[in-house]
Image: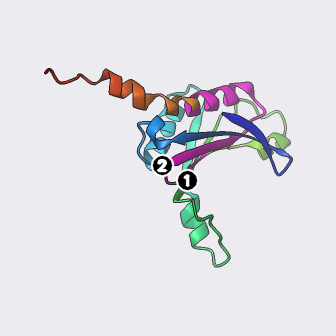
Amino acid sequence: MKQTLLQEKYPVYTLEVNKSETSYPDVDSIIAYLRRCIDEHSIARFIAEFDHLEHTRALPEGHIADDIEQAKHVVFCFGTHLPNPQVMAVRPRSIGVVDQGDRFVVSFLEAPMALANNAMESWVRALVDTADARRSAQPTAAA
């Protein structure tokens, strides 16, 4: 997972996952997995799914990079405190999932709360597991 500054000011976490490195076949299955993570978390609350590609395609001035085949967000909140009105500017959270043909790019903006960052990072990192683990767990045919 890489941490970068987008446009020199937004701290973004990004994970590129080759499709051969995950058992999730498409954006919708990754979004469903993330939604399960959110639903199982003691603090996080699911808000919505957003199809960014569909939205952008519908705009007369919309532009989509040629290598983006699908792009969706899962939107949720970790907010445990409302100490002032300004904290609303950094909520809710979202994780974006993009299909670029041979890989998925999963990204989220750094949150001002370690609990949220740790959860999102662990959820996203877990996407890279499963293809090898599930293949090795399958029984082999006897000769």
Q: Which residues are magenta?
A: 96-124
**Of callouts 1 and 2, which one flags the residue occurring earlier in the amino acid sequence?**
2
What residue is shown at x 59% (from left), y 46% (from top)?
105
Task: Tell me whether the residue at label 1 lies in contact with that at label 2, contact meaning CB atoms closer than 8 angstroms.
Answer: yes
Query: 60 or 64, which is in the foreground?
Result: 64
The quarter of the picture where residue 81 lies is top right
Relative to 64, residue 77 above or below: above
User: Residue 77 in the image: x percent, y percent?
Assistant: 64, 38
Q: Amino acid at mark 1?
A: Lys
* Disc 1 to disc 2, C-alpha distance: 7 Å
Instruction: Check the image and name the residue furthest to the front.
Output: 143
Q: Which mark, residue 72?
A: 1
Relative to 142, residue 79 above or below: below
Q: Which mark, residue 27?
A: 2
What residue is shown at x 55% (from left), y 49% (from top)?
48
Query: 79 or 51, which is in the foreground?
Result: 51
Residue 128 visible (yes or no): yes
Q: Amino acid at mark 2?
A: Val
What residue is shown at x 44% (from left), y 48% (from top)?
26
Instruction: Check the image and name the residue furthest to the left.
Output: 143
Q: Residues within 10 Å of mark 2 (few under 14, many from 20)?
A: many
The quarter of the picture where residue 110 lies is top right
User: Residue 108 in the image: x percent, y percent?
Assistant: 67, 42
Image quadrant containing the N terminus: top right
Residue 75 visible (yes or no): no
User: Residue 78 in the image: x percent, y percent?
Assistant: 66, 33
Q: Is residue 142 left or right of residue 43?
A: left
* Residue 114 part of the magenta-drawn span: yes
